[in-house]
Amino acid sequence: MRIDLHTHSTASDGTQSPTELVEEAKASGLGMVALTDHDTTSGWEEAVAAAVRTGIRLVRGIEISCSRNHRSIHLLGYLPNPDDPRLVVELARSRDSRVTRMDRMIERMAADGIPVSVQEVRAQLAPGATLGRPHLADALVAKGIVADRDEAFRDLLHDGSRYYVGHYAPDPVTAIGIVRAAGGVPVLAHPFAMRMASVSDELVEELAAAGLAGLEAHHRDHEPADVERAVRLAQRHDLVVTGSSDYHGAGKLNRLGEHTTQPRQWSRIVEQSSGVKVVQP
Ligand code: AMP
Ligand code: FE
Ligand code: FE
Ligand code: ZN
């Protein structure tokens, strides 16, 4: 069975609805797919209905934006109870902060003669979805200011840009504790991607001690040396090794199932979970 444990829908910055995503996962021959939208579980309900209808195993997950020393770290959480009060509060705090952060990015761009309005960005967002830079990119594309999301990030929206503003994000140790307390299983997403340069061997050790369950080793943003490093650290700290596409529909080059997770590794994750169950067709 082919298993892809990291995808995004229009509930965050993917371009396909949860239904379209699940249908494409089935059509592409995956036996199991995880929906892991940024800082929200709002796509779950629709994805569950689609999974039952199309006949594919669905893992309900999230990707929590975390921060340490002003550097961004992404934590995947598999099968947490979505009604856990601390999880609900933490995700809402992040999403709220993303709204004011977007206002400030728009102000900075306006001051520099790049006219884009809050309404134009909002028009790119599905109801209840997590607002992010990709939606600002989409608004810039719609206005003909850039050709695509890639150009928007390269020229205007990257982390080092003068228009970049951060948002509230928990420390990864806090987020690991919250995911575990909600019965979920925390896995560090693409730890050695260039933009995640903050993740040192020491931080992996610290997070493992705090309850981290796994490392996403096989990922488009990892060079072969990064994959080796992740596998080596996973062995050292007895962590699960995953591989995933981080699919965003048309929003990124990543294709569904381009990296997958071994069923044996998935078993190690699911046996640690107690929040919600895998949706079986
Ligand atoms: P934010 O969470 O609002 O700071 O935005 C970060 C998101 O932007 C990440 O989830 C990525 O999926 C997305 N992203 C980063 N670089 C690019 C890119 N070059 N093209 C499309 N999406 C990107
Ligand atoms: Fe994303
Ligand atoms: Fe990520
Ligand atoms: Zn992702």
Image (spheres, rainbow, N blue to C red):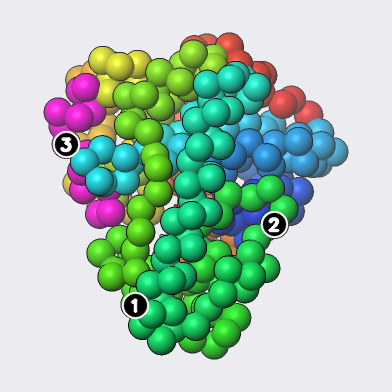
Residue range of the region highlighted in magenta in the rendering: 194-206
Residue that lies at the very extreme toward the right in this rendered image: 53
| Residue type beneath disc 3 | Ser
Residue 93 position in % (x across, y down): 50, 37
Asked if the beta carbon under badge 3 is closer than 8 A to the nearest atom of ligand 3, the reply is no
Please give the name of the residue rendered at 58% of the width and 49% of the height, measured from the top-left corner.
130
Between the residue at mark 1 and the residue at mark 3, the CA separation in whole angstroms equals 28 Å
Q: Tell me if label 3 and label 2 are in contact, CB under 8 Å.
A: no
| Residue type beneath disc 1 | Asp
| Residue type beneath disc 2 | Ala
Q: Quadrant of residue 85?
A: top right
Q: Main secondary structure of the magenta part?
A: helix
The number of discs equals 3
Label 1 or label 3, whichever comes before in sequence order? 1
Q: Specify whether residue 189 is in view.
A: no
Asked if the beta carbon under badge 2 is closer than 8 A to the nearest atom of ligand 2, the reply is no
- Pointer 3 local density, CA inside 10 Å: few below 14, some 14–19, many at least 20: few
Name the side, left or right, on which 23 lies relative to 270: right
Between the residue at mark 3 and the residue at mark 2, the CA separation in whole angstroms equals 36 Å
- Which label sits on residue 155? 1
Please give the name of the residue rendered at 53% of the width and 54% of the height, measured from the top-left corner.
99
Q: Quadrant of residue 227?
A: top left
Asked if the beta carbon under badge 1 is closer than 8 A to the nearest atom of ligand 1, the reply is no
Residue highlighted by disc 3: 200
Foreground label between 1 and 3: 1
Between the residue at mark 1 and the residue at mark 2, the CA separation in whole angstroms equals 25 Å
| Quadrant where the C terminus is found in the figure | top right
Residue highlighted by disc 2: 126
Residue 22 position in % (x across, y down): 71, 46
Asked if residue 227 lies in the magenta stretch, the reply is no
